[in-house]
Image: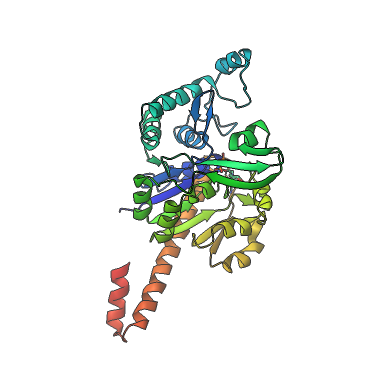
């Protein structure tokens, strides 16, 4: 059966969902579109943290304790840079440096960033397509009480402590979506928004207008998993960002970020009382345990997601077909049945 799933993913939360989907029923059918707006030049090298987290996680090379970076790392290069007086607040391990050197060289040679990401992923042994939303540079910038900061300066150097006043995605307005991402979205049966930061991971992908429009136009069933459980992030600054933007820091706030884009929001059982308010935004809900501590959790959540999405997509199609056939000149019972059968 041809069944195609597209996952929009940030780093840590995105990679957990990607791992679940990769090791579940979707292994043969998965395409990932990763976030590039955390990318930044460091020591003259182009660093792409979310794309690397996805590649390293899905090829079992990730440092599982940290959730990012390569396992079995050493830091001799960073130590040497420090001796030379360089700013070394951004941890980059010795093997990880090789990825950034390789990527930067290929970019300087004029190779498309999408092809570079695919090349690196393939060399690490990734079997599913990992696409970029754009080959242009889009970068998250935060206006804070310390002034404008790049994402990594806010996140790593200042440990998410500056007060956020405004978040922008520099370059997003003029960024062109990649043809690979657009065609994956157009052909998708199911689009999944990972439990990633809704502002600076998924929100940054959606800030590329061609991507947003393609998702709206897609006939796929669209599901998001909330990254907020009981009003708290599992990791990272999504809570601070939601509050700074006057969005409630819970799954209702996440639903508001995705209103008009998704059919279903998967929320944690602890957030059952929010379901009613989420339904008012024309978004269905499904309650389960959404915390993923190990591979079994990730696969279980992915399989539940696929099952509920397939069931709901079928119901949605039946309802739409029945409404269309009822609105048309009164058909015979047999004609109605044939129309429904033909459409599913
Ligand atoms: P980043 O780019 O590395 O910050 O990663 P993402 O944007 O992909 O993921 C960050 C988000 O993942 C945070 O808001 C977390 O709350 C969420 N997250 C991490 N682990 C889990 C989990 O096990 N379950 C859920 N529901 N969310 C998670």
The N terminus, quarter of image: bottom left
Near-viewer residue (93 or 46): 46
Which residue of the protein is positioned furthest toward the bottom in this rendering?
330
- The reply to whether residue 235 is in sight is no
The C terminus, quarter of image: bottom left
Q: Horizontal placement of 325 versus 151: left or right? A: left
Near-viewer residue (315 or 92): 92
Numbered circles on residues, count? 0
Q: Is residue 282 above or below residue 237?
A: below
- The reply to whether residue 284 is in sight is yes
- Residue at image location 60% in from the left, 34% down from the top: 152
- Residue at image location 58% in from the left, 50% down from the top: 290
**Ligand 1 located in image quadrant:** top right
- Residue at image location 45% in from the left, 23% down from the top: 101
Residue 107 placement: quadrant: top left
Q: Horizontal placement of 84 versus 303: left or right? A: right
- Residue at image location 37% in from the left, 45% down from the top: 178
x%, y% of residue 311? 43, 63
x%, y% of residue 11? 53, 39
Q: Is residue 338 above or below residue 21?
A: below
Near-viewer residue (97 or 278): 97
Q: How is the image coloured?
A: rainbow
x%, y% of residue 115? 36, 35
């Amino acid at each position: 059966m041809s069944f195609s799933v597209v996952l929009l993913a940030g780093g840590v939360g995105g990679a957990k969902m990607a791992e679940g989907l990769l090791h579940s029923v979707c292994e043969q059918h998965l395409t990932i579109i990763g976030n590039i707006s955390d990318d930044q030049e460091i020591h003259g090298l182009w660093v792409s943290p979310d794309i690397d987290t996805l590649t390293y996680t899905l090829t079992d090379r990730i440092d599982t304790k940290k959730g990012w970076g390569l396992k079995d790392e050493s830091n001799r290069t960073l130590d040497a840079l420090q001796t030379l007086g360089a700013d070394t607040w951004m941890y980059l391990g010795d093997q990880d440096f090789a990825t950034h050197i390789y990527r930067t060289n290929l970019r300087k040679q004029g190779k498309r960033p999408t092809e570079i990401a695919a090349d690196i992923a393939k060399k690490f042994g990734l079997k599913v397509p990992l696409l970029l939303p754009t080959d242009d540079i889009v970068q998250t910038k935060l206006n804070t009480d310390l002034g404008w900061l790049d994402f990594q300066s806010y996140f790593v150097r200042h440990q998410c402590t500056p007060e956020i006043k405004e978040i922008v995605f520099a370059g997003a307005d003029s960024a062109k979506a990649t043809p690979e991402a657009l065609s994956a979205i157009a052909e998708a049966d199911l689009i999944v928004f990972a439990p990633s930061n809704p502002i600076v991971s998924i929100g940054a992908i959606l800030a590329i207008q061609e991507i947003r429009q393609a998702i709206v136009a897609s006939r796929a069933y669209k599901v998001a998993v909330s990254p907020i459980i009981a009003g708290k992030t599992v990791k990272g600054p999504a809570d601070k960002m939601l509050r700074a933007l006057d969005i409630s820091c819970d799954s209702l706030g996440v639903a508001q970020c995705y209103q008009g884009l998704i059919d279903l929001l998967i929320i944690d059982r602890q957030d059952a009382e929010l379901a009613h308010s989420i339904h008012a935004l024309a978004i269905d809900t499904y309650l389960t345990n959404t915390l993923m501590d190990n591979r079994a959790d990730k696969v279980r959540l992915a399989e539940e997601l696929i099952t509920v999405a397939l069931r709901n997509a079928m119901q949605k199609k039946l309802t739409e077909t029945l409404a269309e056939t009822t609105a048309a000149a009164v058909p015979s019972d047999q004609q109605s049945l044939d129309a429904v059968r033909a459409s599913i």
